[in-house]
Image (cartoon, helix red, strand yellow):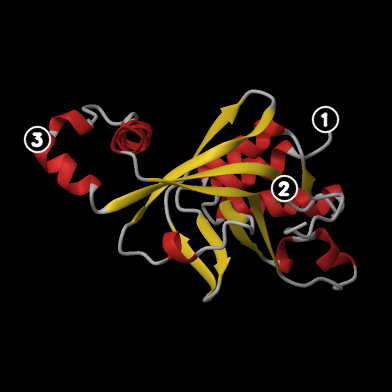
Amino acid sequence: MSLYQPPHFREDDPAALQRIMRAAHLPILVTTGVEGLIATHMPLTYQPVPGQPGRLIGHLARANPQWRHFDPAQEALAIFQAHEAYISPSWYEAKREHGKVVPTWNYEIVHATGRLEIIEDRQALLDIVTTLTDLHEQPRAAPWQVDDAPSAYIDSQLKGIVGIVLHISKLEGKRKLGQNRSLADRQGVIAGLTADGEADMAALTQATLPA
């Protein structure tokens, strides 16, 4: 286990875990080796694999020592943090009732652990870059494509990176959205988040309320 998961915050639903990973645009890849822990903030994209937990793809700068110095016998860890917000105790109904309240932070996170594979094959690396590019360009009115750049230039850029595939062995999710609080407290949090402009967190919290 890499993640502390109280039962009321634990999230195991694959669709919810994938949504959180998609919403976390710059996860952290953590590996260990002879030089200790190394962490890189980098885009990673989840891909389903039939009969398995799935995989993550991305790429590192070739100059980044992480890809050379990780221990292949040890699993790597990718940390995805999506929506998060400060929660003021002044929002709780309990503050008015007895005052025994303190601040906290609510959030959605996923930890993915698994075996790390390094990709240096040109076509496989180009496929990774194209997949990542298409994903992030897709919402734009005129999406940029890898083929828009000269082929020789793309080749030169590919020489400066290595691809990675994290073959997931375990996905752990946590959605800390006040599920351990009273209904009145949670409604107060929703109102407070809305007033603070945290519409996404307010909506996520609202969705946890009993029907």
Q: What type is the residue that disc 3 sits on?
A: Pro
Q: Can residue 95 be seen in this view?
A: yes
Q: Which mark is residue 115?
A: none
Q: How crowded is mark 2: few (under 14 residues within 10 Å), some or many (20 or more)?
A: many
Q: What type is the residue that disc 2 sits on?
A: Glu
Q: Is mark 3 on a helix, strand or loop?
A: loop
Q: Distance between the residues labelled 1 and 3?
A: 55 Å
Which is nearer the eye, 171 or 100? 171
Which is nearer the eye, 83 or 164? 164
Q: Residue 211 carries which label?
A: 1
Q: Do the residues labelled 2 and 3 touch (CB within 8 Å)?
A: no
Q: Distance between the residues labelled 2 and 3?
A: 41 Å
Q: What element carries label 1?
A: loop
- Relative image position of residue 88 (x, y in whole percent): 68, 66
Q: In which quarter of the image is the C terminus?
A: top right
137 with respect to 87 (left or right) = left
Q: Which residue position is annotated with label 2? A: 172
Q: Are marks 1 and 2 in contact (CB under 8 Å)?
A: no
| Residue drawn at (75%, 48%) of the image | 187
- The earlier-in-sequence mark between 1 and 3 is 3
| Disc 2 versus disc 3: nearer the observer | 3
Q: Which residue position is annotated with label 3? A: 150
- The earlier-in-sequence mark between 2 and 3 is 3
Q: Can residue 144 be seen in this view?
A: no
Q: In this view, does 74 lie above or below 158?
A: below
Q: Distance between the residues labelled 1 and 2?
A: 26 Å
Q: Quadrant of residue 79?
A: bottom right
